[in-house]
Amino acid sequence: MGTTTPPRTLAEALRARGDESLAGLLRARPDLLSPVPNDITQLATRAGTRASVVRALEHLDRFALQTAEALAVAPDPAPYDTLLALLTGDGQGDGDGRDDAGAAITAALPGALTTLREQALVWGEDTGLHLVRTARELLAPSPQHPSPTGLGPTVAEATAGMSPGRLQEILAAAGLPATHDPVSAVAALAGLFTDRTRMAELLDTAPVEALSVLDRLVWGPPYGEVTPNPAPPVQWLRDRGLLLPVSTRTVVLPREAALHLRAGRAHRVPEPVPPALVAAAERDPQAVDRAAAGQGFMALSTVEDLLKLWNDGGPAILRAGGLSVRELRRTAGSLDVSEPVAAFWIELAYAAGLLASDGQTDERYAPTPASDEWLDLPAQDRWTHLATAWLAATRTAGLIGGQDAKGRALSALGPDLDRSAAPEVRRRVLALFASLPPGTAPDPQTVLARLRWERPLRTSGPGGPAAPGGASDLRSRIALWTVDEAELLGITGRGALSCQARALLDEGPDEAAARLAPLIPEPLDHVLLQADLTAVAPGPLERPLAEMLSVLADVESKGGATVYRFTPGSVRRALDAGRAATDLHAFLATHSRTPVPQPLTYLIDDVARRHGHLRIGAASAYVRCDDEAVLNEILADKRSATLRLRRLAPTVLAAQADPGSLLEELREMGYAPAAESAEGDVLITRAGARRTPPRTPPVPVPEGPPVPDTTLLTAAVRAVRAGDSAARAVHKDTSETAAAGSLPRTTPAETLATVQAAAMTGSAVWIGYVNAEGAASQRVIAPVKVEGGFVTAYDHTADEVRTYPLHRVTGVAELADEQPT
């Protein structure tokens, strides 16, 4: 530990550490920095609080946790050899490595102890290891909180309050001589249970049924219920103290007896080595990269389709927030995916800042302005944007469809979907994938086993459906969702991690985009027109071509090639968007590798000839047409009765319906009306007219305090050291020159001279200071400038430069020469 005298407290152990070691502690346990401790003593106190210890224990791997659990049932302090014996069992604690399990434990134990020491959960030399008191209370056995080791209380703890006469009866039944006091009686009984030879002789005389009772209790739980008149085997065990009473109906197997029956082991199966990842399949790495790139391109296409679907205003927002089940089902049908998959794409677009609420009175979801910028990016950059957003998102789409802690349904884009553990689990799962050779797909169950070994104490959170494979805790469910989502997004291909995903994890988005670019097909500038009023896109299309074609035709099928179908409604949609028939003919002739079929030409001309022949405007609404016969036809049609039309002039009909409803009704009747403005001009309906105001993506919910950077750690360690120096200076001064706990007062002249000298020499001083509110404090400062009745100094306690009026300084003293070791 770097000292000749073993530390007596955790504070002394922390004080003996170097600055780098203290910074490592604060980095591993950032909750200790909120706020920065005043000194080492306060740091040690905070490191022993229940909330902080629980958080630290949750971040231990299984063997480090098993080591802490063994220390919790060991004497305090525990020598290293005692701890090793509890983990390896009798006869293996000498470290001779006589079997593989013992050798593995012996090799792994120093590393586990190092982890526990670095996180300030264990302190002391190997001759006397101390588990911090709070951790011992959390891990030690009790009737209310059974030990994870399955061990019960010691003989001394279980016999507390037992009458001296009863103790003597137990000694006599066990063949031990009588003693004169309860303390020696308890010591004699404990000595019997820890003596392997005498204990073996005692158990040789036990009935077979009594040994069966012990077998049921030995690995825990150690408590059992008994009747007022127990069976003879149980009575035999009670008479000899092998079962001790906890209450009138409960008995417990004492720890010393259980350890003998376990051959000295605290755990049935110590796990010093993490479970190995098992390969489910080994594939060609290039095939994996191509499959992942293809799936990534499909992901981009799906998100683009989602943005297009909600382009002119998406579904309304529920009063409680989020998307209704009906709207999710409708969106899933439009995207041709299942509802859970649709929920994933919606949440991903939201996390990437491409979708948001428009904030209007009739609040709806719509694409954001950032979505237009995203669509203009190259395909590889669009993919890295989505993948990066997915890695950092705390919103967990897998929870959708489940219930929260209050039994309320969890909806897509709704509240309560944040799980702060999600980013860490995703990155860890992908790191495990990356640890295998390229092209190797791991078995997901072995991935779950490794995650459970690495964080055994992390338990499930509220809400969410059960994950497949029997995973009930939240981290395991997130891990399984990660495997599925990574395949959907193109992070993995055919179950193995792609080269572009490895680059994203290790080198950043730019390198990932560079790896992905050669694998993505170049967009095409042409389609193949068919005589059956369809167009085939043999690959991805350039964005202007794809946008215009999506207006002019409807998507009929997707896959390696996309099939578009031209219909009267789709052609009218293009005309409504301001395109003339000549524009459409020219567009098709330019972008088709095959001649434009005559049926398609006739379709465009026929729809264009009738388009705008009727005009719809606002009165409530009116219909205007130069051909009186057409208006007569509409009036005679029974389907127009709901519109309540009446003639105002030979070429004008008035309606009680609004213009939008009138347009839809007449189109359903087979006409091709066009809306017009108050000036009589045709209104052009352009796609993509609705956008939200500028929105920022949702901020991930952090899991506890953020990990501090190097600058903050350096400043915090310096501040803690300075505060500790001040505390030690107080101690020295109170023993020599001042009243207990007080700084000696100095005259204004002495104060001025001392701080001026410190400014000239660059040394630090200790001052007493009273602020404007009358609150007194003591600080360690390094004066930089003294003028005008003020001292400007670096305040080590606050870790910043401050200016103090000299008339508020009550006293000043130089720091003690000795510094903390």
Image (cartoon, rainbow, N blue to C red):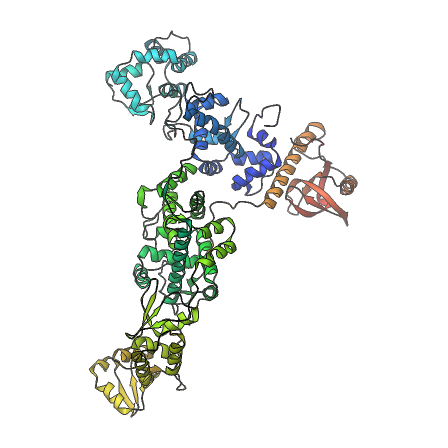
Residue 196 relative to residue 32: left or right: left
Q: Picture quarter containing residue 642?
A: bottom left
Image coordinates of residue 320 in percent, x first then y, are: 36, 58
Question: Which residue is at 26% across, 77% downward?
Answer: 668
Q: Which of 455 and 761 is in front in this view?
A: 455
Question: Which residue is at 48% across, 64% downward?
Answer: 377
Q: Is any part of residue 688 visible from this angle?
A: no
As drawn, the residue found furthest toward the left would be 638
Image coordinates of residue 456 in percent, x first then y, are: 41, 37
Q: Picture quarter containing residue 563?
A: bottom left
Residue 2 relative to residue 529: left or right: right
Q: Is residue 639 above or below residue 334?
A: below
As drawn, the residue found furthest toward the top would be 177
Quadrant containing the N terminus is top right
Q: Is residue 375 above or below residue 59?
A: below
Q: Is any part of residue 68 visible from this angle?
A: yes
All told, the count of numbered labels is 0
Q: Picture quarter containing residue 774?
A: top right
Q: Is residue 55 above or below residue 127?
A: below
Q: Is residue 407 above or below residue 765?
A: below
Q: Which of 326 and 434 is in front in this view?
A: 434
Quadrant containing the C terminus is top right
